[in-house]
Image (cartoon, rainbow, N blue to C red):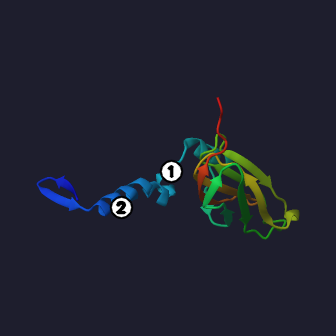
């Protein structure tokens, strides 16, 4: 038994209770990774450059990245935007922004009404566990966003000195 003295009270902890508490404290950042990640200003600046003074709305954009990837060297990213893709209402571009990569602007894909659907699947490199945003620019000038969080166990995009 381990004794824990808090003010004038002494609490006896069993070894199992003590180890369980230590384990929970040690892995708590892995349980909810989005709460422990700080948003980097470079990613926020990149998004601000894309949208300017326009408001970004949530919805219409579906971004799918595996929630846990073993290696950030090759991560499958799937993206789709709800749009009729007609002459008067279509997706002009989608910008994918990374929170933790050395360069936050991962890529931009352009669409026209002749694209038929605003969907794509590609592979990207991720430097670390992070949030990735997809910002769709519509033909009417509106911006829509979607995002996905992922936990990367082996980072990519590292700089070697």
Q: Secondary structure at mark 1?
A: loop
Residue 9, image x, y percentages: 13, 57
Q: Can residue 157 be seen here?
A: yes
Which residue is rendered at x = 32% and y = 63% of the image? 16
Q: Residues within 10 Å of mark 1 (few under 14, many from 20)?
A: some
Viewport quadrant of the N terminus? bottom left
Q: Secondary structure at mark 2?
A: helix
Q: Residues within 10 Å of mark 2 (few under 14, many from 20)?
A: few
Residue 160, image x, y percentages: 65, 32
Quadrant position of residue 41: top right
Q: Can residue 141 be seen here?
A: no
Q: Is residue 58 left or right of residue 17?
A: right
Residue 82, image x, y percentages: 72, 69
Tell me the residue that label 1 is attached to: 37
Tell me the residue that label 2 is attached to: 20
User: Who is closer to the viewer here, 64 or 31?
Assistant: 31
Q: Which mark is residue 9?
A: none
Q: Is residue 87 left or right of residue 10?
A: right
């Amino acid at each position: 038994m381990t004794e824990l003295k808090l003010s004038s009270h002494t609490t006896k902890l069993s070894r199992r209770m003590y180890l369980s508490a230590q384990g929970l404290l040690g892995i708590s950042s892995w349980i909810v990774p989005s709460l422990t990640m700080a948003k980097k200003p470079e990613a926020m600046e990149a998004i601000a450059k894309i949208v300017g003074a326009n408001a970004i709305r949530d919805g219409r954009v579906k971004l799918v990245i595996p929630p846990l990837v073993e290696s950030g060297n090759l991560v499958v990213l799937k993206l789709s935007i709800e749009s009729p893709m007609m002459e008067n209402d279509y997706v002009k571009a989608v910008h994918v922004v990374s929170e933790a990569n050395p360069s936050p602007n991962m890529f931009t894909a352009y669409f026209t009404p002749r694209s038929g659907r605003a969907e794509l699947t590609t592979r990207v490199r991720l430097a670390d566990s992070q949030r990735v945003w997809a910002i769709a620019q519509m033909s009417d000038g509106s911006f829509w966003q979607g995002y996905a969080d992922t936990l990367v166990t082996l980072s990519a995009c590292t700089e070697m000195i």
